[in-house]
Amino acid sequence: MIRVVVADDQPLVRMGLRTLIETEDGVAFAGEAADGREALSLIRSVKPDVVFLDIRMPLMDGLEVLRRVSADPACTGVRVVVLTTFDLDEYVFEALRTGASGFLVKDSDPADLLRAVHVVADGGSLLSPSVTRRVIDRFASGASARPVPHLDKLTEREREIMRHVASGASNDEIADRLVISPATVRTHVSRAMVKLGARDRAQLVVFAVQSGLT
């Protein structure tokens, strides 16, 4: 059973997500919060599998909640999906860098919201190729490369695959491009994540941007 917490200051958003979650088999609604402080307390208490977290909330914004959750060893298994009003929020790159597993627009199709729960709970990320490209263009094109610890431990093949991951390509797409099996791609992605200490695929994208691999 995947336990989900919703944190948003808009009652209608919380009600809509709760109703949606309660209709999905294998998913349980684990609580809701209307402000950042309440959200942080609830997450630490419940330790849900997935959190839908609004960026802009009273008392404590979503980014600060995310920072504290990501830094808390007791919340290692918590995966956060950032909710935004627009399809490219100014805080999205920072949210991904801080530890979010992806983001969704609040008026996304209900099927996409439910799919997000399963994808993120399974260790995946919500970064489409078009969104990934726009995130990189807007937030990283003018930034200088930053050193990423342990990047030198990656093999050349792992670096190559990491570049493809940063483009938003799926494992199957990467396999087609490199003429290797999807299982081999998954192995390289997993090894790269372990070596770099990435929580998930979304952080691999961030590391690729920061290191200049993109």
Image (cartoon, grey):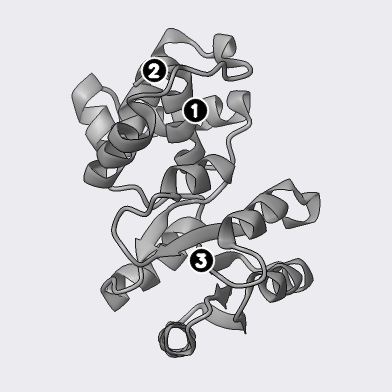
Q: Which residue is mark 2?
A: 213
Task: Give the Cα distance between marks 2 and 3.
Answer: 31 Å
Q: Secondary structure at mark 1?
A: helix
Q: Are marks 2 and 3 in contact (CB under 8 Å)?
A: no
Q: Give the mark nearest the N terminus, 2 or 3.
A: 3
Q: Which residue is mark 3?
A: 56
Q: Are marks 1 and 2 in contact (CB under 8 Å)?
A: yes
Q: Which kind of residue does numbered mark 1 sit on?
A: Phe
Q: Position of residue 94 (x, y in %)?
A: 50, 43
Q: Which kind of residue does numbered mark 3 sit on?
A: Arg
Tag count in the figure?
3
Question: Relative to the observer, which residue lies in front, 110 or 11?
Answer: 11
The image shows residue 77, relative to residue 5, as above or below, that is above
Q: Secondary structure at mark 3?
A: loop
Question: Relative to the observer, which residue lies in front, 157 or 11?
Answer: 11
Q: Give the mark nearest the N terminus, 1 or 2.
A: 1
Question: Relative to the observer, which residue lies in front, 183 or 70?
Answer: 70
The image shows residue 198, relative to residue 100, as above or below, that is above
Residue shown at 57% from the left, 46% from the top: 99
